[in-house]
Amino acid sequence: MAIYSPLRSRRLAARQTEATQRLITFKLEGETFAIPLDRVHKAITLDAAGERLGHRLYGDPQGTGVSLIAYQGRELVVIDVGHQIFGKAQQILPVDRPKKATVVAPTSMAEVRYLLILQPEPDRLIGLPIDSPPSIQSLQISAFQPLPAIYQQYRNIHCVSAMSLELADRPSIFLLDVTALGQPSE
C-alpha cells in the first residue's frame, strides 16, 4: 500500500514535464530543418552521382525540383525542398545522366548524399534529397512558433509550418509540413 504524501504530490506537480517531439533534423543552405520522426519511413545514403544500387533520379528535364526515383519496385516522387524554399535547385542529386550502371563507393563524406523517404499519408511515400547527415533530436513542442503570415507570403513558402526560436545551445529550426510537401504549390 502506497503512502500518500502531500509534499511529494506538490513536488511532482511543480516538476511538470513538457511534451517533446522526436524530429529528424538536417541542414539545407545553412539553415536547419526538421521533420517529425514518425513521418520518416527510411533514410537512404546515395553517392555523389545520385545513385545507390541502381537508384537514379529522372523525369525533371526543366529543373523544376520535382523528379522520380525507382524505390522497391515503385516510382516515388522526389521533391527538392531547397528548390521550393530557396527558389533554386540544390543540385544534390543529378538527374538521369546516361552512363554505365556501376556503383562506386564515395571517397569522402563530402560526396555522400541522403534521400529521406517520407510518408505524408499512410499509403503514399515521397522522397526528399538532403545534403547533410540527418540526426534525431527531441525538442519541446512549445519551442515552435508559427511563421509570420507575411513572411510566408513574401517567400511563397507553403511547406514550412513553424520555426523554433534560436537558443544558446542550438540554432533556429524550421519545421517542415510533410503533408504540404507532397502537394503542388498554388
Image: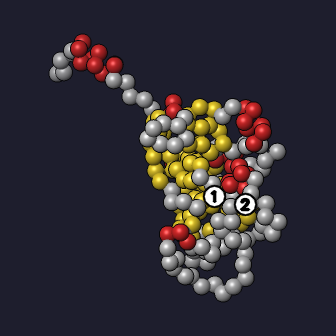
The image shows residue 89, relative to residue 148, as above or below, that is below
Report helix, strand or loop for mark 1: strand
Q: Which residue is mark 1?
A: 128
On the rendered structure, is 98 left or right of 132? right
Image location of residue 10, percent across then percent down: 29, 15
Q: Residue at 56% across / 43% down in the picture?
A: 173
**Which of the labelled discs sits on residue 58, or is there none?**
none
Tell me the crowding category of disc 2: few under 14, some 14 to 19, or many 20 or more residues within 10 angstroms, Cα based. some
Q: What is the three-letter code of the residue carrying label 2?
A: Ala
Q: What is the three-letter code of the residue carrying label 1?
A: Leu
Report helix, strand or loop for mark 2: loop
The image shows residue 104, relative to residue 5, as above or below, that is below
Asked which quadrant contains residue 36, the reply is top right
Asked which quadrant contains residue 101, the reply is bottom right
Image location of residue 177, percent across then percent down: 64, 43
Image location of residue 141, percent across then percent down: 51, 34
Tell me the crowding category of disc 1: few under 14, some 14 to 19, or many 20 or more residues within 10 angstroms, Cα based. some
On the rendered structure, is 137 left or right of 145? left
Q: Residue at 71% across / 66% down in the picture?
A: 68
Q: Foreground: 1 or 41? A: 41
Q: Which residue is mark 2?
A: 89
Q: Foreground: 56 or 84? A: 84
Q: CA distance from mark 1 to mark 2?
A: 13 Å
Q: Residue at 69% across / 71% down in the picture?
A: 94
Classify the position of the N terminus by image quarter: top left
Circles 1 and 2: CB atoms closer than 8 Å? no
Most extreme residue toward the top, as rendered?
Answer: 6
Observer able to see residue 73: no
Dot in front, 1 or 2: 2
Observer able to see residue 43: yes
For marks 1 and 2 on the same chain, the one whose residue lies earlier in the sequence: 2
Image location of residue 170, percent across then percent down: 47, 42
